[in-house]
Amino acid sequence: MQIVSPYRPFPAESSAHRKLGPFDWVGAVRMLAESAFRIGPYHVSVITDLDSPLPVPAFSYHTHERRLMLWILEVSLRYLESADFVQDTVMMSPDTLVLRPLTGFFAGDLTVLTRPAPKHATRPHHPIINAVQWWPVRSKDRLIDFYRQVLALAKTMPANVIEWGADTAALVQLLSPITTGMHQRAGLQVSMLDANQILTNRVQTGQMAAIAHFKYRAKPQMAASFARLMASA
């Protein structure tokens, strides 16, 4: 099994991106790789652009998009189309850590993580958490067709969505309605798992979650959580 993580240095474009402040994304990839090798051992490679050499293992492709949300979709598609996609692959954001084995989550043609809407939402709800996806190699052709649809749709979205969130919004539109279970969507058998049972934002003793995800304001906690994880190994 292979893990890939999309990353290319981009200037902060959206207010949400700017609010993150400075973050060592290459350092995060290295922590992800260490956590994954400890469990699998799973090997982690960045998927990136040919013009962005990085000091970590990487698959590099020629890409055209220079808006972060669209680029993430494009580089994912380039990997799916490439000769590098020869084994079951988990796509993980760099700001994640592997806590438990990941092979058991491959099902159908695509596995995504969903979350129910909160009872009292004060801001827009995103029913898919796009930090992790499972791509079985047996579904290569169907995944390529699907990601071409996703990228084409994302390009048509309003400017503010392309600035932040188009990568997830396009998935949501094509895979709706979003409910846990196995569903036929957009030419795929899609397994939708409850993210609350897979993800956590902390590392602690007796951890049952499979993945730690340090999104937004949790990013400063990643290094300390990684240190605790390795100390417990």
Image (spheres, helix red, strand yellow):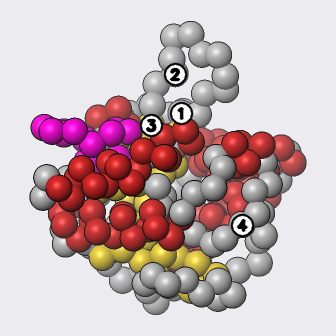
**202 inside magenta stretch:** yes
3D distance between C-alphas at marks 2 and 3: 10 Å
Q: How many numbered discs, if any?
A: 4
**Is residue 76 shown left or right of residue 83?**
right
- For the record, the magenta segment spans 200-213
**Overall secondary structure of the magenta stretch?**
loop
Q: Residue at x 13, y 37 (%)?
A: 206
Specify the quadrant of the image occupied by residue 183.
Answer: top left
- Between marks 4 and 1 in the image, the one whose residue lies nearer the viewer: 4
Distance Cα–Cα, label 4 vs label 2:
31 Å
Circles 1 and 3, Cβ within 8 Å, touching? The answer is yes
Label disc, if present, on residue 10 of the rendered structure: 4
Name the kind of residue labelled 2 in the image.
Answer: Ala
**Which three-letter amino acid code belongs to the residue tagged 3?**
Thr
Q: CA distance from mark 4 to mark 3?
A: 27 Å
Q: Which residue is most to the top?
A: 120
SS of the residue at dot 1? loop
User: Is residue 44 inside the magenta stretch?
Assistant: no
Residue highlighted by disc 2: 117
Q: Position of residue 113 (x, y in %)?
A: 42, 43
- How far apart are the two marked residues, 4 and 1, measured between alpha carbons? 26 Å
Quadrant that contains the N terminus? bottom left
The secondary element bearing badge 4 is classed as loop
| Label 2 with label 3: CB-CB less than 8 Å | no
Mark 4 / mark 2, whichever is N-terminal:
4
Residue 114 tag number: 3
